[in-house]
Image (cartoon, grey):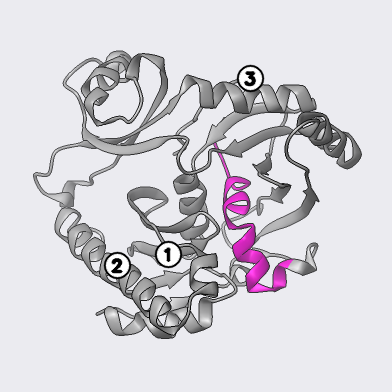
Amino acid sequence: MDMTLFNLRKKKEAGWLAVGLHSGRVEAVRIERGADPDERHRVLRLDVADLRTGAGHDDEFGQVVRREGWGRFRCTTVLNPGEYQLLQTPVPDVAEAEVKQAVRWQMGDALEFPAESATFDVLNIPVPGSGGARGRSLWVAAAPNAAVQRVMNAFDAAGLDLQAIDLPELAHRNLAHLFAEPGRGVAMLHVGEDGALLTFTYEGELYGARRIDVTETQLRDADVERRAALVERIGLELQRSLDNFERLYTFVGITRLLLAPCALAVELADELRSFLYIPLDLADLAQVLDLSAVPALADPAQQGRYFVTLGAALRTGA
């Protein structure tokens, strides 16, 4: 199931071009989904271009779009951390058609921006019959209208058909699901440019997400003492998050933690194992995706750099 954050345009064609627009860089990924469950999805293209910030930025983005031919695809993009909030809340006792309006007011005090000037979407968190008496809950995603409008304006100016805006947590979930084992949940940690993100998924659904304020750059540039403190911060947060998740979702079995690819993955994995009571394994996207058309992605550092955009390209919603 996809949270269509935010469904913006009329359908164009099957498949998605995921476009990540960053300060100083734009990247695009297109993935062809396997025809059957046993066939790996194939990464067809990874395009990356540097952008200058400031005056002329929008026009430069448009030049890249025209040069690479992105305009013929329907596109999705991902909001950056700080541009939205993703929260869990009990399902309000209202008719389904009124849920979004109900959570707008229900979550107002929890938001860092005014609810009346925000865009909302919701995603149910399934609880199977074996999940016990725990009440139904849902994810609430909210972003200031101004943030959503900025993204829409940038894509419109560049000539792109932006049909949906997603969240990093959902892109993360898409990739984590590729590593799923029957009847087991997946806990995955990714440490990247924007910090660390831990997610818990089960049967293709997002059940838990936790951000940790440690970036790949901080770890790489830290001296020995500072790095030890940063690793400890991640390790203790992993402990708390795993304990809390297991209490909340007893029906989801988590038997290992996957560390998503990044330049520091091997060393970081060794440092984090002492904090965990479950095994920690390295996740290599080459195990679950066909990367033959984009040889650069054989490098785990490159997989980590484009991790979120790769996940966004696996979107299945309309």
Q: Which image quadrant is residue 127 in? A: top left
Image side of residue 112 versus residue 192, left or right? left
Residue 202 among magenta residues: no
Q: Which residue is mark 1?
A: 189
Q: Which residue is mark 2?
A: 238
Q: Please report the bounds of the magenta region as a residue range.
A: 297-318
The structure residue drawn at horizontal position 64% and vertical position 57%, both measured from the top left corner, is: 306
The structure residue drawn at horizontal position 68% and vertical position 41%, both measured from the top left corner, is: 19
Q: Which image quadrant is residue 291 in? A: bottom right
Question: What whole-number distance in Å separates the C-alpha atoms at marks 1 and 2?
Answer: 9 Å
**Callout 1, which amino acid?**
Leu
| SS at badge 3 | loop
> In this rendering, is residue 43 above or below 86?
below
**Callout 3, which amino acid?**
Arg
| SS at badge 1 | strand
| SS at badge 2 | helix
Mark 1 in CB contact with mark 2 (< 8 angstroms): yes
Seen from the viewer's position, the closer of residues 220 and 183 is: 220
Residue 246 point in image, percent of width and height: 19, 61
**Callout 2, which amino acid?**
Leu
Q: Which image quadrant is residue 274 in? A: bottom left
Question: What whole-number distance in Å separates the C-alpha atoms at marks 3 and 1?
Answer: 33 Å
Q: Which residue is mark 3?
A: 9
The structure residue drawn at horizontal position 57% and vertical position 70%, both measured from the top left corner, is: 262
> Which numbered circle lies on residue 227?
none
Answer with mark 1 or mark 2, whichever residue precedes in sequence.
Answer: 1
Q: Farthest residue to the left: give it.
A: 133
Seen from the viewer's position, the closer of residues 228 and 67 is: 228
The structure residue drawn at horizontal position 66% and vertical position 50%, both measured from the top left corner, is: 33
